[in-house]
Image: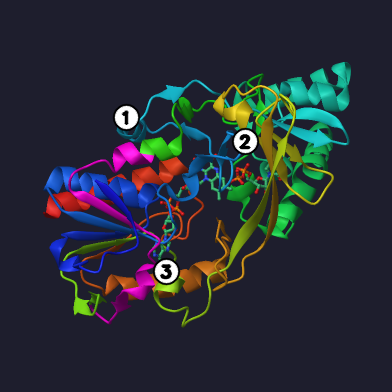
Amino acid sequence: MSISQGLPGRFNPQSYDAIVVGAGFAGAVCARCLAEACGYKVAIVERRDHVAGNAYDQLDDAGILVHRYGPHIYHTNDERVHEYLSRFTQWSDYSHRVLANIHGTLMPVPFNHESLRRAFGEERGEALYRKLVSTFGQDKKVPIMDLRERNDSDLAELADYVYQNVFLYYTMKQWGRTPDQIDPAVTGRVPIFVGDDDRYFPQAQHQGMPKDGYTALFERMLGHDLIDVFTGVDIRDIMEVGERQVSICDRPYGGEVIYTGALDELFGMDRGALPYRTLDMVFQTLPQDRFQPVGTVNYTVSDNFTRITEFKNMTGQVVPGVTTIMREYSRDYLPGSGETPYYVINEPQNQKLYQSYRERVHGLLNFHVVGRLAEYRYYDMDGVVASALELSDELISNH
Ligand code: FAD
Ligand code: UDP
């Protein structure tokens, strides 16, 4: 493998069997699979100056390992994904825990048995818990929007509390909309948990952090003789999209193209821009061992940021006397501005616009789209890896 900044003057796309756009999970998994299984020579073109996409981590000036694009916690129940990624890293046994700061009291999120006690007191908390267990069963996940529909005065009281204190203001900050106005699958990512497990991903079979970090995982995955990575290059500067085929460096390209960027950008947004939310991430290094008790604290009823992450609490890094935290401020993404489109806004009219771009891609020869941006989907890392493995299977079987 080589990683070069920029393209060399002698860059010849025709000498590669595949061009992959984007060095995040989607692109890196496809590149590795095609190099390994087909013996393809693969060039990855990445517009950032590093690999790993949004999972990128690096040491900051204080020597703290930080996630440059937001806290990334690996969790999956997909055995194939886990086995695949485990080729490139060992895992720490970290379990992510999140507390909601509700008027100064910290309560576990997802809202669970202990949260009930803290919110309602011992007696009432236990009574509500028993009601949840008898209604839904032990160790079950109940999305807030489902709980709100229950016709029961105890459950209504609970649903109202959790809706008002955990979901409403946080969701307004994150999406600029109320929970009723967004895709229920989004709030359903953090269901109430009827049990004592206080991990953010209860019941996830595998969870943890890559032992040496995400960037190291990527460097190993991309460490293959047949893979060349070119960072700091925007594919739009060298690729033209025609009706049936793409040209790269002014010549029709006959190999496979795997595109993991946004589809509207591919077509110059000629049918309109796909809406996203972006984040302003504000990092702060403090002269103290520890800032907060867990990896992430969500500010669900106050402040104008959504959450604070303290990286040492997630990575287990030991550096005395200093810590780095990060606050996330969410807002609408400005298309064409160079901002990062972090979150898809899953609404019917946006999906319709996406599909109209996607149909145009279908007509392109040997052109494949995969990943959180290219599929316009709210994917976690494991979902992206699964999707990239599926696409790779298809390409390998056609080879
Ligand atoms: P990306 O990582 O975005 O990679 C795409 C790459 O393509 C980018 O590096 C981009 O620069 C490049 N690219 C785009 N257009 C071009 C172009 N024109 N030319 C060249 N290069 C281009 N998932 C979890 O499982 N756990 C978590 O805790 C978690 N936390 C998250 C927190 C935040 C704030 C965010 C935003 C996401 C989080 N995710 C998490 C989701 C995770 O980041 C994604 O699922 C995964 O990184 C997506 O991989 P990808 O390859 O599809 O996209
Ligand atoms: N959410 C909330 N309060 C919380 C946690 C989550 O309202 O304390 C809602 C919010 O709408 C958020 C969604 O649930 O966008 C999904 O949360 P998750 O933590 O999965 O979001 P991500 O980590 O992807 O930003």
Of the numbered discs 3 and 2, the one sitting upstream in the chain is: 2
Q: Which residue is mark 2?
A: 62
At 39% across and 36% down in the image, what residue appears? 216
> Mark 1 highlights which residue?
83
Label 2 neighbourhood size at 10 Å, few (<14), some (14-19), many (20+)? few
- The reply to whether residue 393 is in sight is no
Residue at image x 80%, y 29%? 106
Q: Secondary structure at mark 3?
A: helix
Circle 1: is it few (<14), some (14-19), or many (20+) Cα within 10 Å? Answer: few
Q: Report the Cα–Cα distance between label 2 and label 1.
A: 34 Å
Give the x, y percent position of residue 306.
73, 47
Q: Nearer the N terminus, badge 1 or badge 3?
A: 1
| Chain part drawn in magenta | 218-244
User: From the viewer's perspective, is 67 left or right of 297?
Assistant: left
Query: Residue at left 49%, top 49%?
Result: 54
In percent of width and height, residue 153 lies at 84, 35
| Type of amino acid at the residue the image marks with label 1 | Glu
Q: Considering only order in the chain, which callout, 1 or 2, is on the residue closer to the N terminus?
A: 2
Front-most of residues 104 and 117: 104
- Seen in the picture, residue 167 relative to 313 is either above or below; the reply is below
Residues packed near mark 3 inside 10 Å, few (<14), some (14 to 19) or many (20 plus): many
Mark 1, secondary structure of its residue:
helix
Is residue 328 among what the camera can see?
yes
| Above-or-below relation of 284 to 363 | above
Q: CA distance from mark 1 to mark 3?
A: 30 Å
Residue name at image x 74 percent, y 28 percent: 292
Asked if 146 appears above or below 287 in the picture, the reply is below
Residue for badge 3: 263
Q: How many marks?
A: 3
